[in-house]
Every structure is written in C-alpha cells, then in structure tokens.
Amino acid sequence: MSINEIAKHLKVSKSTVSLVINGKAEQGRISKALAKRIMDYVEEIGYKPNALAKSLATGKSRTIGLIVENIGDSFFGPIALYIEENLRPYGYQVFYSSTFGEPEIANEILNTMLEKKVEGIILSPTLGQEEQIHYIIKKKTPLVIFDRRVVGLKTNYVGTDNYTASKKAVQHLLDKGYSSIAMVTIDSPQPQMQDRLRGYLEVVEQHGSSPRVLKLPFRTEKIKDSSTVQEFFQQHPDIDALYFSTNYLCVKTLKILNTQFPTSTFGIVAFDDHELFELINPTITCIRQPLEAIAKEIVQTIIRQLKHAEADFVETIIPSELIIRRSSEK
Amino acid sequence: MSINEIAKHLKVSKSTVSLVINGKAEQGRISKALAKRIMDYVEEIGYKPNALAKSLATGKSRTIGLIVENIGDSFFGPIALYIEENLRPYGYQVFYSSTFGEPEIANEILNTMLEKKVEGIILSPTLGQEEQIHYIIKKKTPLVIFDRRVVGLKTNYVGTDNYTASKKAVQHLLDKGYSSIAMVTIDSPQPQMQDRLRGYLEVVEQHGSSPRVLKLPFRTEKIKDSSTVQEFFQQHPDIDALYFSTNYLCVKTLKILNTQFPTSTFGIVAFDDHELFELINPTITCIRQPLEAIAKEIVQTIIRQLKHAEADFVETIIPSELIIRRSSEK
DNA sequence: TTAAGTTGCAAAACCGGTTTTGCAACAATT
DNA sequence: AATTGTTGCAAAACCGGTTTTGCAACTTAA
C-alpha cells in the first residue's frame, strides 16, 4: 500500500495525504474533517511508509554505520550493544559490519554504507583505511573514530588512555615486588598497541630492568602452536611477571601455560577486563575500559556532529581503571 | 554527483548513463564509443550511485535484518559475525538490532526494518512477537527464526536439539555416579528453555530420583543477591551435581558459590560452551552448540527463500555436542 | 460591488535512480 | 524510389515519498 493508492482511494491528492500523515495538516491548511478521514483510513489499513522513498526525498536516512573488527568480540560486542541502546532514543538505527581486520573488506563496507546514505559513521579503523577516512572527512559525513586512533589525522576520537594506563599497570607490578616483567602483545602497528607498549617500555627502563617483549601473531588462531611461547620463557627464566596487552592474549597464553607451568607464581596484569578474570585461580588483575561510558561518549559525539556538521573535532580520552585482583599479589 | 549531473555534463540522457553503468550498454544498443566516454567520466569523478534511489527503483535493498536479544552476548555475537560473513558473498549487508528481550522494542525494530525494505529477516524472537511474525509470513517476507522456536507457528527454523542434548547431559552425570542432580535455569517460558527442562525432568524421573529445580530471574543482573542460591542449597543438602540451562547462569552461580562453597565437589554440566570453561578449575563440561554451523544453515535458509519465496518452510536441527571436561568427573 | 485576503486543497517539481518505449537517421532490400 | 529494417540514443513513465506553488472558492473589508 503506497501513499498514491491511499490518495486514489480517498479521492484526494497525495500531497494532502503526506501532509496529514506527517502531522503537517495545519501547515498545509488541511481541514480537520479531511485530516481525520485520512488518518482513520491510514490506521485502518495499517499503512507503513516506505522508508527508502522517504529518505530519498528528505535526504535523511536515520541510520548510522558502525564498523568494528569483530562483533563477536568481548570488547566490540558490548560496545555495539551500548551504542545501539544510546542511539535509539534519537531515532537512529545501526548498520553494522565486521571488518575481520582486512582493509579491503573495511573499505568495501564503508563504500556500501555511504551508498546507502548513512548519516554518520562510527569506526574502529584498521590500518590501510587512511585514504577512505580522508574522503569521509572531506565529504563532511559525521564520523567518530574509536578504540584505535589514526595517526596524523584530526578526527573525532573516543578512546582510553592506553599509554598512561599501561604505565600504571606495570608500575603496579613493580610496586608489588616483581622485578622482571615481560610484556606479551600482538605483532601489530596499531596505535593503541604501540601506546601500551610505550608505557611498558618507559616504566621498565626507568626502573632499570631490561624489557622483555613477546610479540605474538595478529591472527590469534595461530597461537595454538605453543612453541613460541615456551621458547620465550626458556630464554628468559628470570621472568616473574607478565603484562598482557589484551585480555584474549592473556586467556590464550594462560591456556598454554596452565598445562605446563605453575602460573600461580607469576604476577599477571592484562589490558581489558574479561568475564573469566574473576573466576579463575588466581583471579586476574586488569585494566578495565569503561565500555558503557565509551559507548555513551561515542554517541554524544556523533549526535553533536549530526546536529551541526561544522562542529570542531573532539578527542575524548576516557580513563581506564586498574582492577586489582589476586594475580598481582606476591 | 548524481546520474543527472553526469548526463548533463556529457550531454547525453540519463537513461543512457544508467544503462552503461549497469553493463547493459549492449541491451540498450549504446555504441562502444559513447559507452567508453561515459565509463571514463564515471571513473574520473568516482561516481557512487545512491543506493536508496536504486533500491526504490528496483525494489531490491540487498539488506537483511538480524534481530537478536543481545549482540554483546557470547552466543549471539559470534552468530552475528558468522551470519554476516556468510551473507557477504551473496552481496547482502546486515541491519542488526538487539531487543533486550523486550517485545515492544522488538516490534518497533521489526517495523523500521520492514519500512527500510529489508529483503529478509533473521530473528531470534522474544515472547510476545507472535502477531508480528504472523504478519511477516503473510507478507511473504523471507524469514528465518533461530535459537528459540515460536510455538504453534510454521516457519523456517534453525536450532539445536535442546531436549535430546539436555537428556544426554543429565544422563552423563548419572553415568559418572552422581545421584542427586539439580537443574539451575531461568524463570522463563522460552521454548528452548522448556525443552531443556523437559529433558532434565525426564531423565531424572526415569532414574527414580526427585527433581530439584532452581529458577533464577530472567534479568540476570538481579542474581547478584546470592540469598536465593544459598537457600536452595541449604534446603537440598543432598545435591551432588548441577546442570545449568545456560552458560551465563553457570558463570554467575559459580561466582557466588566460589566464595562460599567448595564447588569442586559438585558435578557440573552447562548448556552452551564458554571461553572460560576450559580455564577455570575444574574445567567445565558442557553442551556445545556449533555456532558456525548454525549460522551457515541460517544463511542457506534465508538465501533459499530469497531465491524462491514460495519455498517450503524448513526446520533444521543441528545437534549439539557434549564436551566432557573435569567438572563432571567424580 | 469590487478589491483584497483567506481557506482548502490539488498540481507539480523534486529526490536519484531503472526500464520501456519512441523516434529520428541511416542502411538495406525490392 | 519507395518500403522495410536497423542502429543509437532520447524521452517518458515509474518507484514512493516531500514540499513548494498555484488556484479556485469563499470571506471580509472598503
């Protein structure tokens, strides 16, 4: 049922129907009587306007694109949930996609989203998207980057204080009396990972001990082969504490170590909290990013841009919290 | 840049441009020379068609709606990921939304998706959506229901064998020598939960022992207050094994019990696997739904419907696997 | 009584595409 | 030379809406 058919059936013009449906009867000077007749019929048949046509005519799609690396992940999943929840009151729906860390997929996704006329984009970028992001900015499409920054690009950004939090974590281990702290991270130039690494290196150097960094492959499926991990520990038998740059690295590594080493003797801190950190023995100390606060800030930022596109770029850093559990007690 | 502007700039008609862009130059009998001139210009300016207008004209949106309870969940998140991954090769994008288990939100979401002309809907329904689902079926919009069935409704459905798997789990505990098995479940009439309960009751009765069922509130945030759980165990001191109807119930309950009971003496099986089940002590035996297989089947089913809308409804049951870990050893 | 203002709606233009039809201009046939 | 057939593209109709403009018919004021 289209607006044309309604108009035909009621023997009025479709402009009249449109005005009435959108509550602009007054403005279009439609008589109350006719307005009621139209509304009654519309309700009777349960008319639902075609949002595509509407968007085409108005230029507003009421849709936001959300692009993350992996919606099944324990960081992005909840973030996506909170973003959606906070966006709903504003009348926006979410188009989402996972990039699997592949810039080609990411760019393809971005393209189709733009073609579908999303009004704004929330993006956790992969490396290799710089050009596309430039393009979005040039087009003045509202954009919020989160989690990982794009180096050398001025955009709206919401993220946590990776560098500072990392320092805090390592310092915490030192304070607890651990002296040879190794960092386990992924082999990736992602800025947030680099920041975490930088924080580690700085504290360790200040302390006068030598850094020990284990870089695992980006694709975590490959970690199953435990030899790299074992070698690392054999080469550095002095290690007495581990700092993980992500929660899943911690989980994966512990799975490997659990079967072979007495992990309970290591001091452990991980970046990002995880459901199981409260449950395993020992419970795991971590740096917790406040997911809900981050999501809220992302939404606020995109809404601000949607309201006045010329708004200045804002970078919001939301501090993470060190959650101290047993794994960092000696 | 619209197709009109391209046409104007090249001094040709927009129909010609459209035909060329869509590779129908032949069919429209456009000369090779002109076709090339158009293509060159299109590439030069990096023209991107407006997908809204395209969809309006063609009636195809190349979009599928995915509605789940909570995209941040360890079941729905990965399922969503795999659905998206399997749908991409067919050229479909995914519109997703979380219902938070609220039928009003669910129905609102469904409405806007239909207004946005999604070509198909993948839905894990909440209770109270029966009417809407009927409406979708009547409209012949391709639909796949998953995870939880809608009672008394013939639709495409993909899910696991809740009843059988549940029996297998309980039988396993009996086989291992546990004699008083309690079931912890949520207080919800969701069919899949009822099926799991039915399986439990049947096996326990056959065995001749008396069923002990702890129903926790649906909104799991409320479980933090541990008194209900404690009372239950005090009332039934004979319990020597626990069967959880979901993984998160198991996690939540263990958190409570860990601080108060020596859980390692209980036999434990949970429905749905969880990342941490391999890591905690003891590792947790569970019933694992094959997420990827389920997602693939969902996609196959929706694609089948998209190809010929008149296809018969198909119910696919994908068996779950019992993953035996230490928590069920005596 | 006539000019000016209102009222109430229809008509038309537009959003950006797709697809069918129409029609010149040229070529081929008889 | 007249008829018929192609070729190559333009024009128009359509998808389903929104919004501006136009215009009768009726009021009001002078």
Image: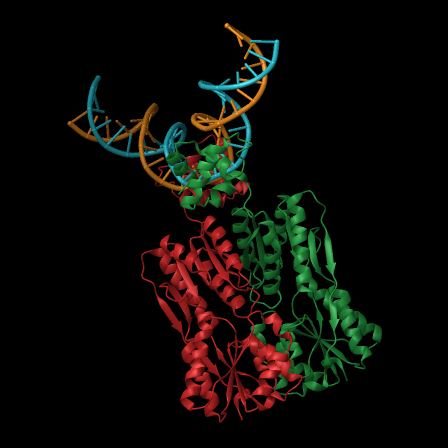
Chain colours: A green, B red, C orange, D cyan
The answer to whether residue A228 is seen in the rendering is no
| Residue A158 spot, x, y in % from top left | 69, 57
Relative to B246, say whether D8 is above or below: above
**Left-right relation of A239 to B159:** right
Relative to B233, say whether B252 is above or below: above
The answer to whether residue B101 is seen in the rendering is yes
- Image quarter where the N terminus of chain B lies is top right
| Residue A132 spot, x, y in % from top left | 60, 51
Residue appearing at x 66%, y 55% in the figure: A298
**Left-right relation of B175 to A247:** left
* Quadrant in which residue C23 is drawn: top left
Instruction: Between residue A166 and residue B45, name the one nearer to us.
Output: A166
Residue appearing at x 68%, y 56% in the figure: A297
| Number of numbered discs on residues | 0
Relative to B50, say whether B78 is above or below: below
| Residue A151 spot, x, y in % from top left | 70, 56
Instruction: Between residue A6 and residue C2, name the one nearer to us.
Output: C2
| Residue B318 spot, x, y in % from top left | 41, 73
- Image quarter where the C terminus of chain B lies is bottom right
Residue appearing at x 55%, y 91% in the figure: B238
* Quadrant in which residue C27 is drawn: top left
Residue appearing at x 46%, y 82% in the figure: B322
